[in-house]
Image (spheres, coloured by chain):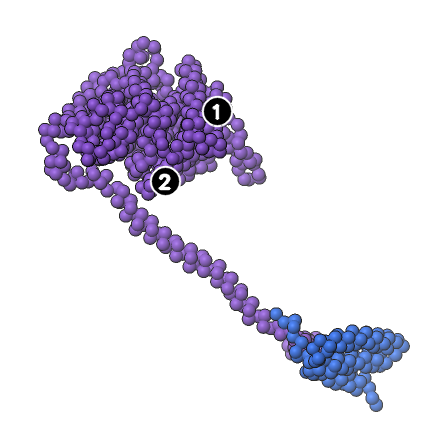
Chain colours: A blue, B purple
Amino acid sequence: MIGLTHYLILAALLFSIGLLGAIAKRNAISVFMGIELMLNSVNINFVAFNHFLHPQFLAGQAFAIFVIVVAAAEVSVGLAIILALYRRRANTGVDELDLLKW
Amino acid sequence: MSTLAIILTVAPLAAYAVIVFFTSRWKALSAGIAIAATGTSLALSIWLLLGMIGDPTPVHVSMSWLSIPHLGGIRGLDISMGVLVDPLSSLMMTIVSFVAFLVMVYSLGYMKGDEGFSRYFAYLGLFTFSMLGLVIADNYFQTFVFWELVGLSSYLLIGFWRLKDSAAEASKKAFVTNRWGDFGFLVGILLLFTIFGTFDFAVLAKEIPAYEHLGLIALIAVLVFTGPMGKSAQVPFHVWLPDAMEGPTPVSALIHAATMVAAGVYLVARGFVLFQSVPQVMELIAWIGGFTAIFAALIALVQRDIKRILAYSTLSQLGYMFLALGAGSMSAGMFHLTTHAFFKALLFLGAGSVIHALHEQDIFRMGGLSKKMPVTTWTFVIGSLSLAGLFPLAGFWSKDEILLVALREGQTALFVIGLVTAFLTAFYMFRLIFTVFFGEPVPAEHGHGHQAHESPVSMTGPLVLLALLSVVAGLVGSPWWQAWFGSSFGSFIFFGEPEAPHLDLAVALPATIVAVLGIGIAWLVYGKKLVRHEALAERFRPLHTLLLNKFYIDEFYALVFKWVMMLGGRVFDWFDHRVIDGTFDGLGSATRTSGGKLRLLQTGRLQSYALVLFGAVAVAVVLVSTNLIGGFAK
């Protein structure tokens, strides 16, 4: 029988993979993908908690929809920035984008 | 009456301002303005003096100048400025404006052709203003303000020939030496203010005798007295006055003989109640005066510079005045101040006339001037006789009064010192006279090939007038005056009881005898040349050298300055640069260095920020969920 724990472990794995991607990948697109993974692992958590703890409400599902919307908005802005960067520098390596320092 | 006093004080200041800002290009006009202003002051002060003789009730006007109200427990502050016209101040302002006026007229001739002519008269105006302001002051605070202004004008005038190194040095020396005295003075009056809450002479005169802590009053009196000691050049602050002779000679006559150096005497007379309430302080004043009197007279015996001889003579006579004040007689001190102002101004102006003619100050390079400069010679002789205290000239009466006071108060030692000083005074003055005015004229090649001639009328006029006063001014303090008019100097200016003058032969006779003796010996040595003075100097070589070098006081101070002050200065300099500056420089550079290191944390790489962020969250989660280290897990 597949229970809440299994979902949570799946979400934790996804989150960790996403985090690793977001922190360790060099390409800005890959970083984005890592972030999307993290957001979606959170969505799994929402839906799983909702289903197993309070099936009579739909709050978890609703929040998951919200997260998807916000993620879409974020991706559109982020991709625009990455495109602009690419046009300027012909490169999307995150480790070279250190102009904010000092 | 107070309005007149203000007008007569401010007039010379107005002259100063006008000369400095508008007329400095036209020399004659500048001099005219200064003389007119001082003449106004003179006329008004004589008017006030006559008014005071008629009705000696003091006129006192005072207005608040700075007022800070009480604030909770903090004491308020109320400083007023005012005018006090009483016999003492009206006499003093007359002396000041009179001598200032004569000196200005005299300077017309003496300073003729000097490129700083206008500046000179402007400074004289400034000085006259400051001195008159000091005289009319009704409280210690105002006195202090003008006291410093007087010091400033003295500085400016000593260093008048500013391109001359010695003059610049002398002006600095005068200023710095005066600062020492003024510091004590300032501390003294501030203490006075903290205790009594007022600077006002009249209020203090009532409150001081009622105050019980005599020790504190004694401390204040001694501190305040350091001011007069500096300004009136009493030992140990005497070193500046002889050097101040670097200034133009009329300035020496006005500031460093007749008026400013007498300001110390005036201040002691003005605040007499303060000093008089502690007998020990009076004793101290008397002894400082007596010591200075004989000390300076001894030095004057061997000096060669005509102005320096007169300068040491001034020191000595100021010592007499303090002796009189310390012995308890304000009348005698002020009386000697008055007569001294006339004959010492005369002597200095006479010396100026000689210097003007010869361009020479060494008395042994002069000689036989009596034929070429009769007016200068005879007025100078009159002044010297008066200074030596010969009957019935002005100096006789005032010196007699002082000796009388010393004897009456039982100060026999001081009386003897006074007598010895009188002898020395007569001797050194006539040493000067027989050398400079009589005897052989010095050959032309030593006299700079300069043909001596009598000075112009603008210079001899003041000489004659002052000579006249040096003869008759003493009469106002004589028993005859008392007999004729029923009043005298002692009943006009006094502290406590009016003092009637009387001639005590036990004092007058010895005083006259020693004076005549001094003149006689001077005549034998320098007039008849019975013994060569060089031989005498050879005979008493160690003593002569000691005196010629002014008891090595200057050298001593230089040594003290070099070793103590400079060493202290270096220590403090080191402390300031190393410790104080080091502390703050260190703080600054520590901040900068640590900032430089810390900024490296900001790599600008988003991913490293994210790593830190998530790492921190992970650590927080672990901490919160582990019971072993204080977590909340069930």
Task: Pick whichever, B450 or B576, lies toward us.
Answer: B450
Instruction: Identify the residue position indicated by label 2 in the image.
Output: B162
Establish if A98 lies above or below B215. below
The residue at the far right in this view is A56
Real-space Cα separation, disc 1 to disc 2, in angstroms: 32 Å
Q: Position of residue B349 (x, y in %)?
A: 30, 27
Task: Pick whichever, B304 or B162, lies toward us.
Answer: B162
Residue B594 sits in quarter: bottom right
Residue A49 in view in this figure: no
Establish if B567 lies above or below A4. above
Residue A85 in view in this figure: yes
Three-letter code, disc 1: Ile
Chain to which mark 2 belongs: B
In this picture, residue B257 sits left or right of residue B67:
left
Instruction: Identify the residue position indicated by label 1 in the image.
Output: B6
Mark 1 secondary-structure assignment: helix
In this picture, residue A42 sits left or right of residue B441:
right
Three-letter code, disc 2: Arg
At x 20%, y 31%, the residue is B366
Q: Position of residue B537 (x, y in %)?
A: 14, 37
